[in-house]
Amino acid sequence: MRVITTIDDLKALHKRRVPRMFYDYCESGSWSEQTFRDNETDFDLIRLRQRIAVDMSDRRLVSTMAGQDVAMPVALAPVGFTGMQSADGEIKAARAAEAFGVPYTLSTMSICSIEDVAAHTTKPFWFQLYVMRDAEFVDDIIARAKNAGVDTLVLTVDLQLLGQRHKDLKNGLSAPPKLTPSVMLNLATKWGWGIEMLQTRRRSFGNIIGHARNVDSVGSLSSWTAEQFDPRLDWTTIARLKDKWNGKLILKGIMDPDDAVRAADLGCDAIVVSNHGGRQLDGALSSIRVLPSILAAVGDRVEVWMDGGIRSGQDVLKALALGAQGVMIGRAYVYGLGAMGQQGVTTALEIIYRELDLTMALCGRRDINNVDRDILLIPKDFEGEWVS
């Protein structure tokens, strides 16, 4: 049996077990995938200072994110199609996160519905909202989230239009997959995944089917989602949704200091520096490069988190040392989910926790809330100005 010690080990198993279209959905970006690659490789440019003869006992990773106690400052990011990576995947991921003590964020485009996840968990989870043209649907899903006990809304603000995602287009991405000859040939090699999927009734978008007007089948859903992302989303809309939600609000998709200041002015509880995992504007800077300028712009007016490219506990430490108060992970936990279901998500969290703890200690720190830039060695041009 293969010994799993890294996120890359989970990624390899994920690729072997899950149909190509869903693996590609996870492991791809838009256009040339430059930003997708930079998200990960830019972490490698930052090095760590090793310290010795420092008391490394009694280490602490516990922290808070938006006022919530967490076992480590890491939350599971919203990821669409999660229930296609593993049967009932959102439920499995939410249960793993709850047991570990970190937040789980359910995507609007999830396979398991808000009610499904609430029925299989015992603590509040977070819910991520895409703003749709159908205002009635948006109002309804906000009410459903409140009724399910959700206390934190993660509003994605970078998806008014869908980025050009070549792999998804070529694969004919859908849930459930359309049984074309090439898809059927690929599914024939993923029999373990297929057997699990046959044992669940959840194979399409549970938050939408039966809830959105005139959407009662997979065929109509495809056209509905293509038409529904609202290009009119602006700061007025965000303010209105904040008032309607009347709870903790996190804005995800901030990549510019001016936008970060607007979010702070609005009174959001946190912002997430994020380029949607490199799946929206290809050619944008990586999240970790943008992070320092956003922190400088907002100071302590709002909590600043980041996501994009995090594949290890060392990546988490680098982001926190740069000044982020938390991070969100997407692909790292999806690899685990696709590889081993709920246990795989737990394994991914354990790997990141162990790497974060060990690296923090070897850098001479004992409390994750006290790490700072002194433990980093950063290239001189890493935060250099880019001429416009």
Image (spheres, grey):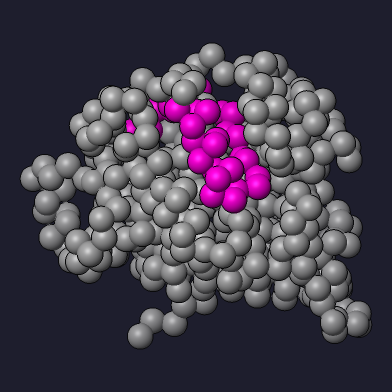
Q: Is residue 349 above or below residue 117?
A: below
Residue at (45, 51) in percent of width and height: 115
Residue at (30, 53) in percent of width and height: 202
Q: Position of residue 10 (x, y in %)?
A: 44, 68
The C terminus: image quadrant = top right
Answer with the quarter of the image where residue 2 lies.
Answer: bottom left
User: Number of numbered discs present?
Assistant: 0
Q: Position of residue 77 (x, y in %)?
A: 56, 50
User: Is 369 contained in the magenta span?
Assistant: no
Q: Is residue 355 above or below residue 86?
A: below
Q: Position of residue 353 (x, y in %)?
A: 65, 71
In the image as oriented, which residue stretches furthest toward the front? 147
Residue at (34, 25) in percent of width and height: 213
Answer with the quarter of the image where residue 188 lies.
Answer: bottom left
Residue 176 seen by the camera: yes
Q: Depth check: 92 or 380 in front? A: 92
Q: Position of residue 22 (x, y in %)?
A: 32, 50
Residue 257 seen by the camera: no
Q: Quick check: 288 left or right of 322?
A: left
User: Is 158 contained in the magenta span?
Assistant: yes
Q: Is residue 367 above or below residue 27?
A: below
Residue at (71, 41) in percent of width and height: 248
Q: Is residue 91 above or below residue 379?
A: below
Q: Depth check: 169 or 210 in front? A: 210
Q: Depth check: 320 or 121 in front? A: 121
The N terminus: image quadrant = bottom left
The magenta region covers: 137-166
